Amino acid sequence: MAAVRPVLVFVLIGLLSGEVSSVQYFGKLIGKLSELHHGVSGEVYAVDSRTLYIKDFTYDGQGPAAYFYAGNTRTPGNSGFRLRDEKGSGEVIRRYRKEGVTLSLPEGKTLNNIKIFYVWCEEFAVNFGDVKIPRNFDYPRPVKVDQLQGVHGVSSDNVVIVDAQTLLIPNFSYDGEAPDAKFWVGRGSKPSPQGTRIPDENGKEKPLRRYDRKTIVLTLPGDLTVFEIGHFGVWCEAFTVDFGHILIPQNLNVPPSLKMLGVSPQSKLNCEVLQDSTAFEVRWAMAGESIIVQLVAKIDNGEYMSFGVSGDESGSVMINGDVAVAWIDKETLKGHAVDYYLKDKSQCSGPTGSCPDSRFRENSDSIRMLNAAQVNGYSIVTYQRPLRADDEYDQPIHSNQSTPIIWAIGPLNQRNEVSFHSEYLKTDKFIHFGRSPKWNCPAPEVEQPMKPKTTQDEDEEEAVTPSRSRNNERRRGSNNRGNPVRESEGSESERVASRFEQSSKRGSNKNSDENSRRNIPTPAPASKKDAWTIPPIQCYEPDDGVFYAQMGPTGGKRGYPAITGHVGWGISWYINGLLIPEINVVRGKTYTFVIEGGLDPNVPAKYHPFYITDDPVGGYEHQSAEDKKKIRIFAGAQQDKDGNVYPTGTGRLCHWTQKGDMEAEDFASFGAYQRTLELKCDQGEPGVIQWTPDDNTPDTVYYQCFTHRYLGWKINVLDSCDEQPAASETRIISVPSPFDQEENYEKNGETM
């Protein structure tokens, strides 16, 4: 039980930052992500100088080493830097389906320093989607407005609109003499009875007490934002008197409420395990003169979890304790957090027992319920309470010393009040709530489930499953560095697994990034378990010796990775409609390859020049200078007068695209999967290369992508062809030639 923990710690962060509001304001729109590959899409907003928010972010999770990236040039590349995701980490990003993602720039970086944001695959140097930051972009920032000045001593320094739901009132004063003064907002330029009460800094809506030059932070209630109000001030509700107000400017360019109460999204939280068997945890963060607490436990329906302050400062004592009793109704999924005073070790009855504060006196509940969620059996309840004691039924929480705590788990009675606890704290326990943030709980890592169920089931599993396998394997692969090694023919899997390439500057491509690049690691070997059987293209087929080379999906775990033993990055070559088939050719015969892998080198995710080589890895453009000297190219590339190698196997992009919602792994055979594919082509003309293998051609060569590694597979070069056809459920798809038969094909088959 201890190893499995829900990950909704960021519910607490969201509540601290104001995301309990459902107002659809995310900051200032930068633009939409270009939809280059792996289904990447979404709208990118600037939250403030160091925070980005992606609305409806979508990514299929199939890239082996994709990260959120930003850079100070307008071209995506390895010279950029990673951003921390919504978990506060910079690990390989998971699958997303129209989700909101909050990202933070590293310390010392602001939107003034970056020119592009993108989703980047480090292992294959591929941009999956990007958005450019406009020049002189005016990102949202807090706005300082007028000072409060009025009757009953109301005054302040200049009020700061921190974000869309948060106001900072520095050095606020009020004499406390009026009977019903409230913080107040409303439409228009003047306060009126039609306005809205604003809870004080402790979340209470009771009449204001005396303030003497006190700096306070206020949060607009519910969905209300500063864009919907015209004024803020102090209003006597009972007597409809304005004690002083200021105007709220229109068309504000302020952040959305991501930094409410001074706690930023990337801040660490505190966490302590209370009981391991029920995975009972308390998480918290200080918020001005209040504290926000999140309770997490795996409890049954009809059970409560309680947590709070001991009735005795010397140790953990139940009598006179002050606790929050929290639970979730699993039928309605409504959450509850109630302020309790433990007057006696019995159920609440009349004026005695363990009772809600409100049973002793009306309006004495000091708990403000914020959020609740039920995830895979875990109850998660978040609430806020003041640090100080509001009344005789409350105990203070000290910020400068340790506080003795108590907790319990037990059944609710018919009145939804506590019955005798079944689990409780049996020793003294102290917590220093004001300590520097420290996480003493299991790490809340996430991973996609191995086999998706329903959307709801998958969401729940992603929220509670620690990442212990796939992402760790990717990280191990990404940390392997070494020198290039050239091993003997015939052991491709072993050779690729042990080969660590050095990256180099791009050759003669005018659009290449000339900055130094990071070493490109070799992915960890993939499992060959349950691989589909892809029939090879025999030496006698097709009759005309024409091969159509197009792009398509890897076929999940049973496709490219299982067939080759290499980790792919989501796409592969399809030859005559087959996923990376082995091709058998005969020496002395001329073969024509019609190339439809992309034309535009400025869009790397859609640019896949085809070439034939003795290198089982591919991606010649990114090989080290030392490795390039050891590699032979037989077709699909030429040298310019300066000796630089450039690709010639380019043409419009055609991509086999799956129809329907089934996962590739759900198909028993490639033939069944193939029937769900349809070919989609961009405008333009295909490219053509011709190749005649000869006596100097090795017995095994490879068709590859010039700009990306691990997209192709083997070509077996034979001396003769005398085999006969064999039946197969998988069909070689006949694609009509797009060329006029009278047009001459350009021949680019020189051996280098």
Image: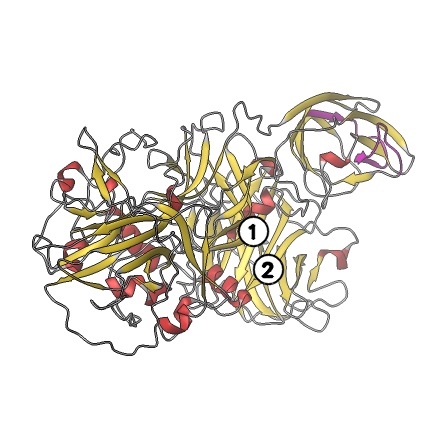
Label 2, label 1: how far apart the Cα atoms are: 9 Å
Q: Amino acid at mark 1?
A: Val
Left or right relative to 542: residue 466: right
Whether the magenta-drawn stretch holds residue 241 is answered as: no
Mark 2–mark 1 CB contact (< 8 Å): yes
Depth check, front residue: 324 or 707: 707
Quadrant for the N terminus, please: bottom left
Question: Does the rendering let one see residue 445?
Answer: no
* Extreme-front residue of the structure: 742
Q: Earlier in the sequence, mark 2 or mark 1?
A: 1
How far across and how far down the image is residue 678, in percent? 46, 62
Depth check, front residue: 95 or 199: 95
Depth check, front residue: 373 or 239: 373
The image shows residue 7, relative to residue 640, as above or below, that is below
Q: Going 61% across and 36% down the picture, which residue do you hit? A: 27
How far across and how far down the image is residue 513, in percent? 32, 31
Disc marking residue 373: 2
Give the extent of the magenta segment. Answer: 170-193
Depth check, front residue: 745 or 167: 745
The image shows residue 676, relative to residue 572, as above or below, that is below
How far across and how far down the image is residue 512, in percent? 32, 32
Whether the magenta-drawn stretch holds residue 183 is answered as: yes
Q: Amino acid at mark 2?
A: Ala
Q: Residues within 10 Å of mark 2 (few under 14, many from 20)?
A: some
Q: Going 49% across and 57% down the picture, which residue do you hit? A: 281
Disc marking residue 11: 1
* Extreme-bottom residue of the structure: 727
